[in-house]
Image (cartoon, grey):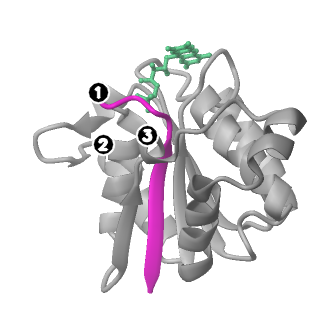
Amino acid sequence: MKIIAFGASSSKKSINKTLATYVASLVKEAQVEVLDLNDYELPIYSQDKEQELGTPNAVKTFLQKINEADAVIVSFAEHNGSYSAAYKNIFDWATRTSKKVYENKKMIILSTSPGPGGAKAVFGTAVTSMPFFGAIVVGSMSVPSFFENFDMEKLSLKNSDLESKMLEIINKL
Ligand SMILES: Cc1cc2nc3c(=O)[nH]c(=O)nc-3n(C[C@H](O)[C@H](O)[C@H](O)COP(=O)(O)O)c2cc1C
């Protein structure tokens, strides 16, 4: 199984990228590619920019990566209750090529934040809306208080309840 994983953030120390990478590593015998949204930096989407630039190569590459995968694992960063600008921008660009950005691929939706909310607002938005964009959401989980629940040295969840729930979700892939 080929898996694309990414944190929906452009922070170089993204905890969501760390979480998505860890969860992808739990899938046995999977070929995992972790994307970094910094490699998909684009002008802020507008119809004018689209007319000027067409479909930028970064958008084509992003869609191609999804096309080649069997499953996608995304962990959403919450910025002011919503998607990070970095994710929203590549997502808006990608929808201009195909509304079904996620191409009927299985998806696991995650989110985390340093605080107890676990980025629940953006998590709720993603769980509700991703199916409209072609994602077959097989499981979802928000991890609160990231630094209390995740061991940054071992790069794994240290909360055993969260870890067993995560393993149940992985089995649905
Ligand atoms: C502009 C901005 C807005 C934020 N808004 C929220 C928020 O609404 N809810 C929340 O839980 N955390 C919020 N945070 C804190 C993020 O959860 C935190 O920066 C987290 O590390 C982001 O994930 P990342 O490390 O994967 O980028 C915000 C951070 C920034 C920089």
List x then y, in percent, for residue 71: 55, 74
Q: Secondary structure at mark 1?
A: helix
**What's the magenta region?**
1-12
Q: Nearer the viewer, mark 3 or mark 2?
A: 3
Looking at the rendered structure, the secondary structure element under dot 2 is: loop
Badge 3 density bin: few <14, some 14–19, many ≥20, Cα 10 Å:
few
Tag 2 residue: 159
Q: Quadrant of the C terminus?
A: bottom right
Residue under label 3, please give it: 38
Viewed as shown, does residue 65 lie left or right of 148? right
Residue type for callout 2: Asn
User: Assess mark 3: CB under 8 A from ligand 1?
Assistant: no
Q: Label 1 is placed on what type of residue?
A: Glu
**In the orientation shown, which residue stands out farthest toward the left?**
153
Q: Residue at x 64, y 74 (%)?
A: 106
Where in the figure is residue 85, as x and y percent of width and height? 63, 27
Task: Find the distance from the CA under tag 1 to the CA under tag 2.
Answer: 8 Å
The CA span between labels 1 and 3 is 27 Å
Marks 1 and 2 close (CB-CB < 8 Å): yes
Instruction: In this rendered view, identify the residue nearer to me: 153 or 65.
Output: 65
The one of 114 and 82 positioned closer to us in this rendering: 82
